[in-house]
Image: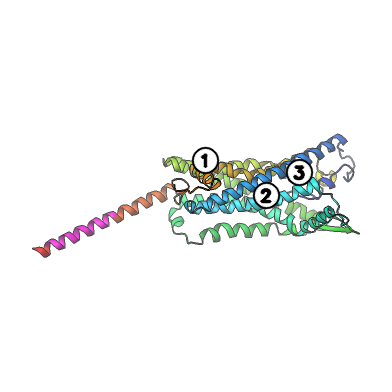
Amino acid sequence: MDSEANSTQDYPWGSEANSSEGMDMGPGCPSGSFEAYQLLGNIDLLVGGYGTLALSTLGVCANILAISVFCNKSFKSNFNNLLIALAVFDLLFLVVCITESVRRTFEDHSANTSSFSGLATQIHHRLFPYFLYPLHNILLTCSIFMTISISIERYLAIFHPLVYRNRSYSWNLSCHILPVLGLSVLINAPKFLESQVIYDGENSRILPTEMRFDRNYSIYYQNWTRFLVLGLVPMLLLIFLNVRVFIAIHSRKSSSKEMTYSTILLLIVAIFILCHMPRVALNIYEVFDYEQISECGPPIWSMIFKVFSNDILPALNSTINFFIYFLAGKKFRRSLLNLVFCQNDRQDNILSKTSFRTADTRVAGHAEEAAKKVKEIIEMKKTGVSRSSSII
């Protein structure tokens, strides 16, 4: 999501590599004041460290509760199963956010084995380049693509109900979840080669690799590929799919339940766009101002902006879906309260097996029931006629 190793987006060495002492400024480059860098450090500590840590912890608890509620038998539906998958990706993403916030807030940039905390930091350093850092990017990509996949599922349910009804038992896994996982790993495979652990005696530090400094890699992968695949294209797809779904549901005079379900989906997408738009905007800036950033490094304002766009806002997006379900779904609220207070949930009215069923699907169901009734009446009449004839 960034243009250069000097850029701060998504990198464990960002705040250290861009300090006022370590910045490699070219001739004629503006230099930030000491107060500006001090402000950056405070914001990075309070917002990117403590703030993200607290929000991610809340999000982990919220997603665990959401998964527990949706796993209830009364919530079994295609749509709710995809919501479970989204909650799992968000949960794992927030867990990695917690480890990064702990590193940023409590750990030193260099670690040694002379103390228990130094040993823990060194273990974290060994895991970060080859596991935690790539996994963090993979899970963020999974969350983005899973939101698109859910929108596609709703689009198919409304505009192609025959295809939707004839789906196989493994439809969700093979057509919605596995493609998301596969694409996320493929897109983020280079992340495994971007950072490394450097040892100086007993001390260890995390630094970028030579590949990360390569100009072509920065321009074509970091800038354009990730901007298009994880920024522009997902935003356009979500807007297109959900605007069409919203218009179709309202034009067909759907029931109040259908309106509620479409509102929930729109809220999920709206919050997603609001939380990820700043990240995309910062990426656009880095794409078109690559030469200046490459020569002088990112300006202070972009590093401050990054703390919000790449740290706390993605964590907020992974946390807030639970509150959308809670506010918009009466059955979700009731089931959650029953779960918390260990009571039995006997009502299956909202978000049940018929949750998020489209108007087309419901009409088709009624038509099938009516056809069965007509067939039964005809058979009864035939049976009555045969009996009367036999009596005569």
Q: Residue at x 45, y 43 (%)?
A: 258
Residue 95 is covered by the magenta coloring: no
The one of 72 and 340 positioned closer to us in this rendering: 340
Residue 34 vs residue 189, the one in the foreground: 34
Residue 180 screen position, x and y as percent: 61, 57
Counting residues from the N terminus, which is met first, the one under dot 3 or under dot 2? 3
- The residue indicated by pointer 2 is 94
Q: Which residue is mark 1?
A: 328
The three-letter amino acid code for the residue at tag 1 is Ala
Q: Position of residue 22 (x, y in %)?
A: 88, 46
Range drawn in magenta: 373-388
Check disc 3: other Cα within 10 Å, few if <14, some if 14-19, many if 20+: many
Q: Name the magenta segment's main secondary structure.
A: helix
Question: Does the magenta segment cover residue 384?
Answer: yes
Name the amino acid, label 3.
Answer: Gly
- As rendered, which of 82 and 144 lies closer to the eye? 82
Residue 85 relative to residue 192: left or right: left
Q: Quadrant of the C terminus?
A: bottom left
Under circle 1, the secondary element is helix
Give the mark nearer the N terminus: 2 vs 1: 2
Q: Disc 3 versus disc 1: distance between alpha carbons?
A: 31 Å
User: Quadrant of the rendered structure where residue 196 is?
Assistant: bottom right
Under circle 2, the secondary element is helix
Q: Residue at image x 67%, y 51%?
A: 93
